[in-house]
Amino acid sequence: MEQYTLLNTLKFTYPSNLSVGLSVLYNDTDTELAKMPGWGSAAIFGVGCLAASAAALYITKRAFFSMYRLYKTIGNAKERLAITPNPRKKNQKVYVVVYGARNHGSRAFCTYLAEHGYSLIIIDNDQAALNSAEKHVLKDFADVSIMKVKMEDFDEGEILRIVKQLNKFGEIIRGLVITKNVMLNEQNSKKFEGLNYDEIHTIIHDNSEMMVGLTNVLIKPIKKAGNGFIINLRNIKYEDEGDAIYWDLLHHSTTNFSLTFMDAIRKAETDKEKGSKVSLISVKVNYESIKTDAQKDKLCSKTFSHLGVTDTITY
């Protein structure tokens, strides 16, 4: 499976079928050691002891790292959400860009971030959805700064203009939350019946261009801000629905993109030595399961507690 060349050019390759074979070879030929009187049993006993010791060490190691991971998640949410503006700029705003305004995932994170003092930049191609998202946040957090950006196709110039405008006033962007589904819903996907592989790839490329473009532009200011993060939500509602060939192609293509997309960012960040580390996490969630305020709050809390600790979680 090819990875994306992120931060330079977007490449999409449909995943090839991979098979991994595991062969365990056993040789039952008698050894010289086994032929010696008493040595066969002793050897077996010794090997057994070594195996038991190795197993005990492995279990101890697993337990240690499990406890360490749990320890890190306990205080991680508070650390990741903590706003640490420049002490010389007491009123400095710290922004998070949220891509998507119409789904439950977007509403959940917009509200959660506003509650923790973040300002918001919400991007969507639907003005009515943007207005509704703004109204939803302001009803409980009237003092939160919200910037609405209507964008049907990725516009690098517009995003750069926003970044420069914030820099001019000493504001920073700390995170990017991608909530808009790359996977199209089942109803809309019916129009793709009969399409070939190349046509499917084109559709996925068009639907993925925004999240790749936003990351390309925003990764630099996010790193500069320090303690930055990128959260990628993936709606898994439709994963088990539909058996048609075109639907399977669409599903596997989008799933591959979503996962490989985050892997590409992670690799790009790992290879770079300069700049602050950006924490990444993919969240698999059925948006229909987060309709209540309590469910939304739990989703966000779980996400931030595992941010920087776990690559992927399922809610």
Image (spheres, rainbow, N blue to C red):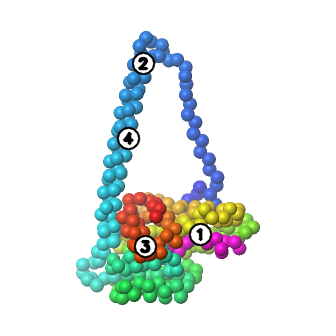
**For numbered disc 3, what is the local secondary structure?**
helix
Asked if the residue under mark 1 is in contact with the one under mark 4, i.e. CB atoms within 8 Å, the reply is no
Asked if the residue under mark 3 is in contact with the one under mark 2, i.e. CB atoms within 8 Å, the reply is no
Comes first in the chain, label 1 or label 2: 2
Seen in the picture, residue 254 relative to 144 is either above or below; the reply is above
Q: Nearer the viewer, mark 3 or mark 4?
A: 3
Q: Which residue is mark 2?
A: 41
Q: Amino acid at mark 2?
A: Ser
Q: Which residue is mark 1?
A: 183
**For numbered disc 1, what is the local secondary structure?**
loop
**For numbered disc 4, what is the local secondary structure?**
helix
Question: What is the distance, in whole Å, between disc 2 and disc 3 at their CAs?
Answer: 61 Å
Q: Amino acid at mark 3?
A: Lys
Question: What is the distance, in whole Å, between disc 1 and disc 2 at their CAs?
Answer: 60 Å
Magenta run includes residue 190: yes
Is residue 5 in view? no
Region rendered in magenta: 177-191
Q: Nearer the viewer, mark 2 or mark 3?
A: 3
Question: What is the distance, in whole Å, between disc 4 and disc 1 at their CAs?
Answer: 40 Å
User: Which quarter of the image is occupied by the N terminus?
Assistant: bottom right
